[in-house]
Image (cartoon, rainbow, N blue to C red):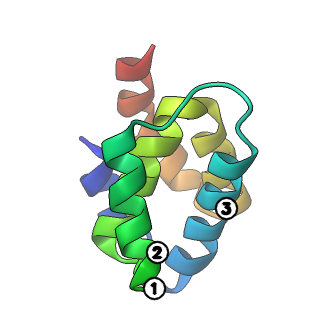
Amino acid sequence: MDFRDLVRMIPKEKRGQFSEKLIDTLLEAGEGEVAPHLAKIILHYWQRDQLDSHAGLTYLLEATAEVNPKQIAVILEESGLQNLSTAYSPLWDKLF
């Protein structure tokens, strides 16, 4: 499983809220840096108002995993996607 697979499991009606929480996490991250290529891609999707698209969310998840991977599980739970927290576990194991 990778981030694309995880995004496929997020219902479309929850993607907007989920992307906003990921953006908040990235903006509030005190430690870690987003790779420049990811920052450029995220900016590209932001400019086109597509951060909640499949591709936009995939890159947001990847960037969040770089700066604060533990927060992804918290955001999944806060978004009412507890079932995806367990789906995220294999990704979590790869990150640590």
Tell me whether circle 1 and circle 3 mark residues in contact (CB < 8 Å). no
Determine the CA span between mark 2 and mark 1. Answer: 5 Å
> Helix or strand or loop: what does disc 2 sit on?
helix
Query: On screen, 79 above or below 38?
Result: below
Q: Residue reaching furthest top?
A: 96
Q: Which residue is mark 3?
A: 21
Between the residue at mark 1 and the residue at mark 3, the CA separation in whole angstroms equals 15 Å
Q: Which label sits on residue 46? A: 2
Residue toward you, 15 or 67:
67
Quarter in which the C terminus is drawn: top left
**Lateral position of residue 58 relative to residue 51, left or right:** left
Image height check: is 77 above or below 96?
below
Q: Closer to the camera, 12 or 34?
A: 34
**Residues at discs 2 and 1 in contact (Cβ within 8 Å):** yes
Relative horizontal placement of residue 79, taking residue 19 as reference (left or right): right
Residue visible at 63% across and 75% down in the picture = 17
The quarter of the displayed image where residue 71 is located:
top right
How dense is the environment of label 1, judged by Cα within 10 Å: few (below 14), some, or many (20 and up)?
few
Residue underneath mark 1: 49
Q: Is residue 41 left or right of residue 67?
A: left
Could you tell me how far apart the alpha carbons at marks 2 and 3 are, in whole angstroms? 14 Å
Q: Residue at x 36, y 47 (%)?
A: 38
Three-letter code for the amino acid on which mark 3 is drawn: Lys
Q: Amino acid at mark 2?
A: Trp
| Residue 58 seen anywhere in this rendered image of the structure | no
Secondary structure beneath label 3: helix
Residue 45, given in percent of the width and then of the height, sits at 37, 73
